[in-house]
Image (cartoon, rainbow, N blue to C red):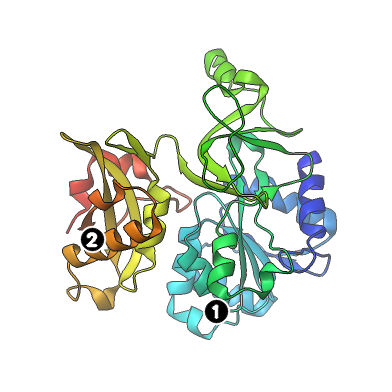
């Protein structure tokens, strides 16, 4: 109940962008067993929204229902929206006015740009199974909405500002707050009335989860002066190269902006000299297969990484073209399995 009220306060209080009201039509684009379903169906019911449930999460079904039922609010993981936007039926579907909350994985800025150009109001939310789930939303202020599509995408892809009743911090290993300058990183820790108290039959894991009186998310991020959280990686997915941490999510965001890239996942692979080095597993768009080399894409990424100043070790990136990327049952990238045997995916 408190989570539902917190979401209602945040989404209902939004001035222009990401605002939800009683005349919206709600349709989830994630299966009901996913953590997304723990929050918004309750919110839609409390507000009395018309609700549409696809049953089959297939792009043609989703596009048809958006048109026929006038769907105005939805949510999904990035790979599902990518699948929808890439489907032929999407070319004739009117997405204008559709508000979509992205969660479960980082949203690439390139996706935010593409969605905005189709008329969507696309923005990020953040949470996890242990948090019920929503902790923050990337709502834009009115002044931000006057910015270019590209500038808005930077904000929309951030993980947002905390909901009412959420105490969210970025801390170092000693639980001290790091600077809110958009650069200093640390672990995201939170307190809120709707968080899990622990894990079933796992007292040690539960104690670690709440070490220091805050729930530890195992996510790494930063907070900028405007109060926006940006999750830069999962602790388990950060790549340690030459003794420094490199964010796989930041590398993915850069590579995804290349016109030839359909999807990308960056993982860390063992390296005798550097400890680990980043490997980009890239699925090309069909029309670009055979038209670009791994070397050319690697050079593009290396120059972009250096220009962005992400990490001096990011230029050690390797690129491999793959025939598929391993995903979970809800469409999230399964980096654990990809790290186990990346060669099995390569062309």
Viewer-closest of 10 and 48: 10
Q: Is residue 58 above or below residue 221?
A: below
Q: Compared to 186, does 55 lie above or below?
A: below
Left or right of residue 85, residue 50 in this image: right
Residue 298: mark in rendering: 2
Q: Image quadrant of residue 72? A: bottom right
Q: Nearer the viewer, residue 177 or 288?
A: 177
N-terminal label among 1 and 2: 1
Mark 1 residue element? helix
Q: Which mark is residue 117?
A: 1
Q: Is residue 25 left or right of residue 261?
A: right
Whole-Å distance between the Cαs marked 1 and 2?
Answer: 28 Å
Q: Is residue 207 above or below residue 255?
A: above
Of residues 272 and 243, the one nearer the viewer is 243
| Rendered residue at 34%/69% (across/down) | 258
How far from the left and from the top, in percent, is residue 73?
Answer: 68, 66
Decide if residue 304 is on the left or right side of residue 274: right
**x and y percent of residue 85 in the render?**
48, 73
User: Of the residues tagged 1 and 2, which is closer to the observer?
Assistant: 2
Side of 36 relative to 90 (left or right):
right
């Amino acid at each position: 109940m408190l989570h539902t009220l917190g979401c209602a306060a945040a989404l209902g209080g939004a001035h222009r962008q990401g605002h939800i009201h009683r005349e919206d039509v709600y349709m989830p684009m994630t299966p009901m067993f996913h953590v997304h379903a723990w929050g918004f169906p309750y919110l839609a019911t409390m507000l009395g929204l018309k609700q549409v449930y696809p049953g089959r999460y297939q792009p043609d079904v989703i596009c048809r229902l958006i048109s026929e039922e006038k769907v105005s609010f939805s949510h999904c993981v990035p790979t599902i929206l990518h699948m929808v936007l890439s489907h032929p039926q999407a070319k004739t579907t009117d997405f204008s006015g559709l508000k979509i909350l992205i969660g479960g994985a980082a949203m690439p800025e390139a996706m935010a740009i593409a969605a905005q150009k189709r008329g969507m109001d696309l923005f990020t939310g953040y949470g996890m199974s242990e948090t019920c789930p929503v902790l923050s939303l990337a709502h834009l202020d009115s002044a931000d909405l006057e910015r270019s599509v590209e500038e808005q995408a930077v904000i929309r892809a951030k993980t947002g500002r905390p909901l009412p009743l959420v105490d969210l911090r970025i801390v170092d290993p000693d639980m001290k707050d790091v600077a809110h300058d958009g650069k200093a990183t640390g672990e995201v820790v939170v307190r809120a009335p709707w968080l899990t108290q622990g894990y079933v039959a796992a007292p040690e894991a539960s104690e670690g989860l709440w070490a220091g009186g805050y729930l530890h998310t195992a996510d790494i991020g930063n907070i900028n002066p405007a109060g926006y959280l940006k999750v830069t990686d999962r602790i388990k997915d950060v790549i340690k190269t030459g003794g420094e941490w490199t964010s796989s999510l930041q590398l993915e965001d850069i590579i995804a902006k290349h016109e030839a890239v359909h999807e990308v996942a960056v993982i860390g692979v063992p390296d005798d000299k550097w400890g680990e080095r980043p490997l980009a597993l890239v699925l090309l768009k069909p029309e670009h297969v055979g038209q670009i080399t791994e070397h050319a894409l690697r050079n593009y990424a290396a120059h972009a990484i250096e220009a962005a100043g992400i990490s001096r070790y990011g230029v050690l990136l390797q690129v491999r073209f793959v025939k598929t990327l391993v995903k979970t049952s809800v469409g999230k990238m399964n980096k654990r399995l990809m790290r186990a045997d990346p060669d099995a995916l390569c062309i």
